[in-house]
Amino acid sequence: MNEIILNAIPFEPDAQALLSEMRIQEDSDHAGEFLQLLAAARRIARPKAVYRMAYVDGRGEDSVWIEGVRLDSRVLAVNLREVERIFPYIATCGVELEGWAQTLDDMLARFWADAILETALYTAIETLKRHLEACYHPGQLAYMNPGSLEDWPISQQRELFSLFSPPEASIGVRLTPSHMMVPIKSVSGIRFPTQTSFESCMLCPRQACPNRRTAYDPLLYAARYG
């Protein structure tokens, strides 16, 4: 497998941006406590990612085969209809940071740590994107993640992980029997070239979603995937 493992990702979070996100006044006692926590996290954090190039070698109405691995999703099959080359990926905040967060007893500190872990995951994702673009020059990319839509259930994490050598050995990410990733602040998916914009949010009617990136389009499924 032509895997690219990114396991030396610098973690240099924007402290002022995090203070603002946490609604912490810069001149408060909480600010000092948070910055101490952030400094400890920076010493420990090792965000990581792995990705590879793969090829579509079979297509069905509601499925697509990636190098012999069947992925069952109507939306994914349509999105990859004209695509030959894709980029499966896994990114994580890292087991080091998750283990550190689990040692915290104070509820407020754990809340702050959760945001720090999210930031580390985002750092891994952004590093992966930049590395992929620099190495492969793929043009405009969209992505899909197992579990983000009912159409592509989270149980398909197993199939996606099978496109890699064991990710637990390379970046410390494993699947539970219920197909959840550990560390929890991890994400997996497929990035693919596209001529039209696509976000899974376009097909998701859930209103109170903190991670929504674009508006739900109630007509899109019938128009593009029906």
Image (cartoon, grey):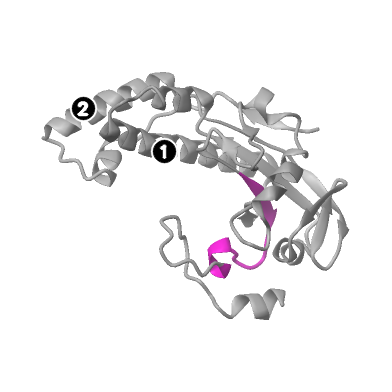
The answer to which image quadrant residue 162 occupies is top right
The amino acid at mark 1 is Thr
In percent of the image, x 81 and y 60: which residue is there? 63
In the picture, the quarter occupied by the N terminus is top right
Residue 186, numbered circle: none
Q: Which residues are magenta?
A: 188-203
In percent of the image, x 52 and y 37: which residue is there? 184
In percent of the image, x 40 and y 27: which residue is there? 101
> Any magenta on residue 191?
yes
Work out whether residue 198 or residue 217 is closer to the camera in this orientation and state it. 217
The answer to which image quadrant residue 75 occupies is bottom right
Q: Which residue is mark 1?
A: 119
The amino acid at mark 2 is Glu
Work out whether residue 42 or residue 174 is closer to the camera in this orientation and state it. 174
Residue 37 place in picture, x, y as percent: 29, 25
Disc 2 vs disc 1: Cβ atoms closer than 8 Å? no
| C-alpha gap between disc 2 and disc 1 | 18 Å
Q: Which residue is mark 2?
A: 33
Residue 76 place in picture, x, y as percent: 72, 61
Residue 58 in view (yes/no): yes
